[in-house]
């Protein structure tokens, strides 16, 4: 589709000439009010606003309520709803086969923090270019409300059952393991979430976004630390975050001392207005301390916790050719007969 | 497949005259050492020297699951008529391992020869063997003063001793050393000296008193020495493997390791960048997940593993079957269950691999029996997987995969790659922008697919393991589920027509007796058939399936014989069970006879000869 002149484009059409409905998916089958649906809406908005070509996107997921959601956004993108806890390996295979794909993986707290934690660990370690979204509600929804490993210690189920085990903090793990874009957000904070998603789309490497996404059916009651009310009452953004596309940079006012800007892989920027903490997300040790503090004091700190734009990706390490492996021709894939003769001779 | 030609050649009578005093070019040499002592190089030099003398030869390594310290045995069988399957009796023992020496000597048949470290005093153990003692450490000390090297070079001393005792040509030993150590000049010199010292010791101190000897022949012209896993890796490279993801496990590790070596050398683009990705994953679940998704996205994707890894891959394989995704999985079988004997050979996974995963699943399995077939199936498996849009297994085993075989060189693929039914943007435009991912358009039950990244608004579809209809939409409709499952069943019938057919070799008119066996059992079966024919005038026809599902000729073969031995290298007769499941009561009772071998050792001919001889006496 031809890109219309930016100045003349009507509202609700992006630089590709696509409308938000070109980024929609099938109707959701999740419970009404589910945090996951709010996240899908922000994904639609972020992909639309960042002018991502839908056919270039691959949506990957594991199993669970969260993992169903790739069917509910980006209808014109290939999707792969795989097996429980294995989204990271599926995302890895898809990106290896076609490095031009924009890969977005959707997982949940059971999918990532329990059955799939090994794959999560190794994916992060490799720094595969992937947006890794964790829709975190502290419970297993599809199997009717058991605690997950991200449930907070002493949190209670509606039945009164209390979780006595410490929670796994996926952001803390991701920073520890060398993730290059680590954020925490809230399904009830669409503005921040869209900025984080757009930043992730411009980042080259693994972007882990752990999003509190309340389960309205099993974990939204008083006493839950994963409910809408708890999230609204407790969310403390560590900064005010704006995503600034490369082409808009000139319009942005920059306030010395209170603002921090970091340029992303594709030339766009994240602009962080510092709040009381004066937090610098490019400082890995500070990020680790922040996560520790949040856990000790039971704080719900949201924003871009950590950003490293210098680390090489898995594709760089593999020294892959620029052309997608999936599209290589027979000439590129099958060496000529002389090569077979040469190899055979070496076994004489 | 030139299997028939190969048979004709093997059966040709040798030109060497028989002399009752001398046994020429027919012996099994066993070298017993301690794992990690560095004997592998010496054994390979010995094997290659015999190979270079033109004598049919094969090498088998019986090794422990250990890095150093446990016993290991390397067996070389040289046979003028080309029979190189495992031979139960050893004719020449090299005893260097104090842990096993006594037992090794006790197991020998009268008349066998023993080359041994003289301090072991083995000559006191038996009076019906020929003993050749040598002070290995002392002799090695003459080669070098360095203690660590001395240990290694002690192994090359026995190459010299055997060279002299068995008349192996010194130039061929030296040639084998050159090829073993290639450019390492110092190593070549040291090893040559060790061999010379071994020869000198034999000349000065030992008197030849056994009948075994080796003479130059011309049976290896043009041939190569290679292990099945190297052949598999090489075949995969010529199959255009572009994503290989794996997790180390014996005995399959060397498939991807050797593939990686070939890819690094021959699959770089003009800019020096890789036209492949090899990833050592965190486990087999990740390995198969990566490969499956790479296949989904259009790469020629593969993984290689062994029994325990196959178990871990089970869930993803079911998804691959139901979501119809191409993928190649090599299963280099070993002894199970559990860790079992991880460094011993078996064919114990054929039943579980065929039906791997939950629900109604069945998979195309290729069954290579030679290094040539490892190479051929290495590339053909990708064509089948992409054409059929399903995981395709190749079931090799430790004997075929890790042992060394002499073979005719491999043949370059005789056809272009088959990338299967993939719709491009242009195809979609021609079709008016729509397609149904799981519809049977052509009547062969194989649907069309598109790849992620295809620039067309109608290209996308959603892949899922849950119930789906022809348009890939989620559904729990029982009609849709039954339709899809029934089509998958029909697709398996399409596969039946595409897989490599069995190799059949039968007498004219057909014998009442037949044998069915697969994979690495082949050399032992051929040797047994020859011995039964020559020694007992028993003709045994032979069918070797090269794939699952079975082709119709398998039933024809069974139906045209009165007694059919089904040879399995597993306890439960898994091939037999598959035949019974496939053909049920179309096979008259009593026709199929089960011969099962599951000691972890490679198959040998004597076991088959004994079984058939007894059976035929009963039948007579």
Image (cartoon, coloured by chain):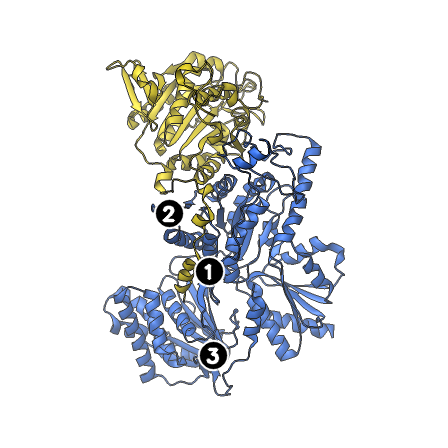
Chain colours: A yellow, B blue
At numbered mark 3, what does the secondary structure look like: helix, strand or loop?
loop
The residues tagged by marks 3 and 2 sit, at their Cα atoms, a distance apart of: 48 Å
User: Which is nearer the eye, B214 or B264?
Assistant: B264
Kindly identify which chain the residue marked by label 1 belongs to. Answer: B
The mark that comes first in sequence, 2 or 1, is 2
Kindly identify which chain the residue marked by label 3 belongs to. Answer: B
> Which residue lies under the disc numbered 2?
B269
Quarter holding residue B3 = bottom right
> Which residue lies under the disc numbered 3?
B25
Q: Position of residue B459 (x, y in %)?
A: 54, 32
The mark that comes first in sequence, 3 or 2, is 3
Quarter holding residue B223 = bottom left
As drawn, B281 above or below B593? above
| Left-right relation of B17 to B550 | left
The verdict on a common chain for dots 1 and 3 is yes
The mark that comes first in sequence, 1 or 3, is 3
Which label sits in the foreground, 2 or 1? 2
Q: Position of residue B420 (x, y in %)?
A: 56, 45
As drawn, B21 above or below B308? below
Residue B155 appears anywhere in the view = no
Dividing the image into 4 quarters, which one contains the N terminus of chain B? bottom right
Q: Position of residue B409 (x, y in %)?
A: 47, 65
User: Which is nearer the eye, B384 or B32?
Assistant: B384
User: Which is nearer the eye, A333 or B475?
Assistant: A333
> Which residue lies under the disc numbered 1?
B402
Q: Position of residue B66 (x, y in %)?
A: 41, 57
The verdict on a common chain for dots 2 and 1 is yes
């Amino acid at each position: 589709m031809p890109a219309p002149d930016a100045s003349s484009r009507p509202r609700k059409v992006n630089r590709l000439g696509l409308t938000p409905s070109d980024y929609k998916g099938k109707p959701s089958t999740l419970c009404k009010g589910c945090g996951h649906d709010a996240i899908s809406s922000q994904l639609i908005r972020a992909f639309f606003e960042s002018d991502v070509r839908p056919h270039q996107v691959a949506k990957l997921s594991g199993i669970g309520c969260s993992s169903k959601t790739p069917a509910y956004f980006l209808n014109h993108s290939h999707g792969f709803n795989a097996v429980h806890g294995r989204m990271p390996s599926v995302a890895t295979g898809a990106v290896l086969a076609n490095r031009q794909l924009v890969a977005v993986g959707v997982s949940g707290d059971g999918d990532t923090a329990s059955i799939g934690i090994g794959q999560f660990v190794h994916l992060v370690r490799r720094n595969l270019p992937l947006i890794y979204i964790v829709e975190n509600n502290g419970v297993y929804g599809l199997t009717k409300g058991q605690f997950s490993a991200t449930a907070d210690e002493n949190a209670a189920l509606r039945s009164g059952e209390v979780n006595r085990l410490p929670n796994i903090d996926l952001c803390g793990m991701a920073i520890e393991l060398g993730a290059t874009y680590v954020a925490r957000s809230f399904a009830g904070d669409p503005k921040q979430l869209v900025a984080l998603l757009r930043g992730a789309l411009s980042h080259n490497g693994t972007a882990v976004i752990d999003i509190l996404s309340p389960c309205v059916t099993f974990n939204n009651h008083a006493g839950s630390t994963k409910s809408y009310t708890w999230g609204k009452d407790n969310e403390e953004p560590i900064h005010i975050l704006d995503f600034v596309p490369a082409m808009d940079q000139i319009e942005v006012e920059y306030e010395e001392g209170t603002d921090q800007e970091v340029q992303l892989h594709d030339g766009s920027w994240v602009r962080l207005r510092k709040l009381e903490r004066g937090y610098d997300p490019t400082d890995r040790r500070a990020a680790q301390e922040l996560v520790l503090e949040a856990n000790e004091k039971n704080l719900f700190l949201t924003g871009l916790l950590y950003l490293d734009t210098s680390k090489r990706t898995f594709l760089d390490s593999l020294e892959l050719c620029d052309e997608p492996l999936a599209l290589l021709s027979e000439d590129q894939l099958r060496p000529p007969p002389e090569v077979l003769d040469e190899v055979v001779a070496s076994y004489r | 497949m030139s299997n028939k030609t190969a048979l004709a050649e093997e059966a040709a009578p040798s030109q060497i005259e028989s002399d009752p005093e001398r046994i020429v070019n027919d012996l099994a040499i066993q070298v017993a050492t301690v794992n990690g002592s560095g004997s592998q190089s010496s054994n390979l030099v010995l094997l290659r020297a015999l190979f270079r003398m033109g004598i049919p030869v094969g090498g088998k390594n019986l090794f422990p699951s250990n890095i150093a310290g446990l016993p290991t045995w390397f067996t070389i069988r040289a046979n003028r008529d080309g029979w190189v399957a495992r031979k139960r009796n050893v004719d020449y023992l090299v005893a260097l391992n104090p842990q096993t020496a006594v037992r090794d000597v006790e197991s020998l048949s009268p008349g066998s020869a023993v080359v041994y470290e003289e301090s072991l005093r083995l000559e006191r153990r038996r009076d019906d063997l020929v003993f050749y003692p040598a002070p290995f450490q002392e002799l090695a000390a003459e080669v070098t003063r360095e203690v660590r090297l001395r240990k290694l070079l002690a192994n090359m001393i026995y190459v010299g001793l055997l060279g002299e005792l068995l008349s192996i040509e010194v130039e061929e030993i030296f040639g084998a050393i050159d090829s073993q150590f290639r450019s390492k000049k110092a190593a070549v010199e040291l090893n040559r000296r060790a061999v010379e010292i071994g020869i000198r010791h034999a000349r000065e101190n030992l008197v030849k008193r056994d009948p075994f000897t080796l003479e130059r022949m011309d049976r290896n012209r043009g041939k190569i020495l290679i292990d099945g896993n190297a052949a598999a890796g090489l075949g995969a490279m010529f199959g255009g493997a572009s994503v290989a993801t794996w997790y180390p496990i014996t005995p399959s590790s060397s498939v991807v390791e050797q593939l990686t070596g070939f890819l690094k050398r021959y699959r770089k683009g003009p800019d020096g960048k890789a036209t492949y990705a090899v990833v050592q994953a965190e486990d087999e679940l990740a390995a198969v997940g990566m490969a499956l998704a790479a296949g989904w996205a259009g790469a020629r994707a593969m993984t290689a593993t062994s029994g325990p890894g196959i178990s871990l891959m089970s869930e993803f394989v079911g998804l691959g079957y139901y979501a119809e995704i191409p993928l190649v999985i090599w299963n280099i079988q070993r002894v199970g269950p559990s860790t079992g004997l991880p460094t011993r050979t078996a064919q114990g996974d054929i039943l579980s691999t065929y039906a791997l995963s939950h629900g109604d699943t069945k998979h195309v399995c290729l069954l290579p029996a030679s290094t040539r077939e490892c190479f051929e199936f290495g590339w053909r498996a990708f064509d089948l997987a992409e054409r059929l849009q399903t995981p395709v297994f190749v079931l090799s085993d430790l004997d075929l995969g890790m042992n060394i075989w002499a073979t005719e060189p491999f043949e370059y693929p005789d056809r272009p790659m088959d990338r299967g039914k993939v719709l491009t943007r242009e195809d979609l435009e021609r079709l008016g922008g729509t397609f149904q991912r799981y519809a049977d358009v052509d009547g062969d039950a194989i649907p069309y697919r598109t790849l992620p990244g295809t620039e067309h608004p109608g290209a996308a579809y959603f892949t899922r393991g849950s119930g789906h209809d022809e348009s890939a939409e989620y559904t729990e409709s029982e009609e849709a589920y039954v339709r899809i499952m029934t089509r998958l069943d029909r697709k398996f019938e399409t596969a039946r027509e595409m897989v490599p057919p069995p190799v059949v070799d039968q007498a004219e008119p057909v014998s009442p007796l037949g044998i069915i066996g697969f994979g690495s059992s082949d050399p032992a079966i051929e040797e047994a058939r020859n011995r039964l024919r020559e020694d007992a005038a028993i003709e045994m026809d032979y069918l070797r399936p090269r794939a699952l599902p079975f082709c119709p000729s398998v039933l024809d073969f069974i139906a045209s014989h009165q007694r059919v031995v089904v040879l399995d290298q597993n306890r439960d007769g898994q091939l037999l069970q598959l035949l019974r499941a496939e053909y049920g009561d179309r096979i008259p009772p009593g026709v199929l006879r089960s011969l099962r071998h599951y000691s972890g050792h490679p198959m040998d001919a004597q076991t088959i000869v004994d079984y058939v001889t007894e059976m035929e006496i009963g039948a007579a």
